Image (cartoon, rainbow, N blue to C red):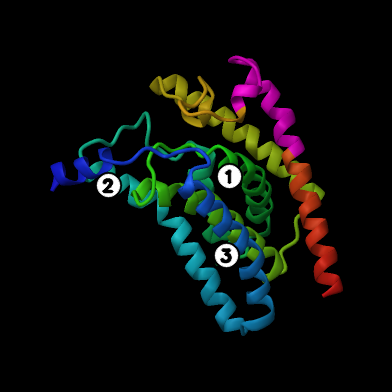
Amino acid sequence: MRSAVSDYLNTYEHFSLFGPSHWAAIFLFIFLVFWLPWYGKKRLSPTQQEWVGRILCVLIFINYPIWVLLEIMGGSFDIKLHLPFHLCRFANLMIPFVLIKRNEFVFQILYFWGLSGMFQGMVSPDILQDFPHFHYFRFFIGHNLMVVALIYAVVVYDLKPTLVGLKNAFIALNLFLLLSFVVNLSMDANYFWIMGKPPTGSLLDFMGPWPWYILTGQFVALAHFGLAYLIYLFMKRKLKNA
């Protein structure tokens, strides 16, 4: 069993940036992010809306635990690589507080984290494995479907991002950065790409060398948070006119 899982995890076609599988993920995301919230709001009963939200929740939440389980089964689990100290992994684990508990505070944080990470995840996916490998689905479920779920929460559950929420999300981002930094120092790891840039190309490549890209990233994060708020204002106007 161990060798079979290990062989599966380490045998794959290499992901090609803006290759067919990348474009497929982008187009599927664009379709879902516009269609699913609208369909849920206009066509589904409250009970059906709840079921869709729970399905989204389960798909996103189990993403990271399944990966950890596979690494353990394959004998390759490494505390320097597989703990939830990357932002997307932590956010995936927190999604039940939004889609099931309707926790306003957590929603505010995840909304701004999620939508700001959308651009990075869409344009420069941090994966090596191409379709149909598990990691291909893991990445796009954890990033693209996460955004779909957050937009669904805004449109269907009427959760509203606020400027106070933007501030709290930025504070939470820096607290998470500080926590990840401490973990990195204690384990000689590189969670949240604080100690070095990711092995694949990313937005960080345009933000200066280490450690200056961490400071530059603060301004980029604020700009992305502001854009996420503008997206909500646009959605709010469209929903009001609908």
Identify which residue is drawn at 42% across, 39% down. Answer: 15
Dot 1: element = helix
Q: Which residues are magenta?
A: 204-223
Residue 127 as seen in the image, left or right of residue 223:
left
Mark nearer the N terminus (3 vs 2): 2
Quadrant location of residue 119? top right
Q: How many C-alpha atoms fall within 10 Å of the one at disc 2: few (<14), some, or many (≥20)?
A: some
Q: Nearer the viewer, residue 107 or 205?
A: 205
Distance CA(mark 1)–CA(mark 3):
23 Å
- Left or right, residue 114 beside residue 57: right
Which residue lies under the disc numbered 2? 70
- Distance in Å between CA atoms under marks 3 and 2: 26 Å
Q: Which mark is residue 99?
A: 3
Of labels 1 and 3, the one closer to you: 1
One can see residue 93 in this view:
no
Q: Is residue 136 magenta?
A: no
